[in-house]
Image (tube, rainbow, N blue to C red):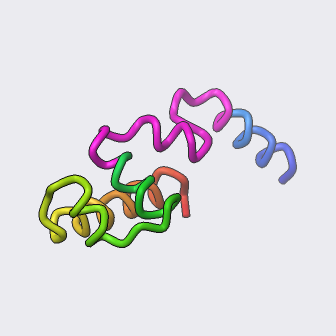
């Protein structure tokens, strides 16, 4: 069992996919990364993000939902 776990960890390390949250965020499209950082790391509500970026609040909310799903899938959460 331990050998299988070690082998899995080795395969994960060898993969070229991002491994940390910072790497995953850096791999996102600019718009998505900016909105997710503003929302999750700066604790800004969608309305404030929309106002600052000059875009509809619904668009910001959609990007947050899509981005959250993408992060969860990529990070295996």
Check the image and name the residue furthest to the right: 2
Check the image and name the residue furthest to the front: 52
Dominant SS in magenta = helix
Is 23 situated above or below 66? above
Task: Give the image location of residue 41, x and y in percent.
Answer: 52, 58
Q: Residue at x 49, y 42 (%)?
A: 24
Is 59 situated above or below 53? below
The boundaries of the magenta stretch are 11-32
Q: Is residue 18 magenta?
A: yes
On screen, residue 74 versus residue 47, left or right, reads right
Q: Is residue 64 magenta?
A: no
Label count reads 0
Is 70 situated above or below 28? below
Q: Residue at x 46, y 36 (%)?
A: 26
Task: Give the image location of residue 19, x and y in percent.
Answer: 60, 39
Depth check, front residue: 20 or 61: 61
Depth check, front residue: 16 or 57: 57
Task: Give the image location of residue 67, x and y in percent.
Answer: 35, 57
Q: Quadrant of residue 39?
A: bottom left
Q: Residue at x 55, y 64 (%)?
A: 77
Q: Quadrant of residue 10?
A: top right
On screen, residue 56 versus residue 8, left or right, reads left
Depth check, front residue: 33 or 74: 33
Q: Residue at x 45, y 57 (%)?
A: 73
């Amino acid at each position: 069992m331990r050998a299988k776990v070690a082998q899995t960890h080795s395969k994960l390390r060898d993969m070229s996919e991002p491994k940390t949250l910072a790497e995953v965020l850096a791999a996102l499209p600019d718009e998505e990364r900016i909105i997710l950082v503003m929302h999750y790391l700066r604790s800004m509500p969608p309305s404030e993000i929309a106002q600052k970026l000059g875009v509809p609040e619904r668009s910001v909310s959609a990007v947050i939902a899509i981005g959250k799903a993408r992060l969860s899938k990529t990070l295996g959460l």
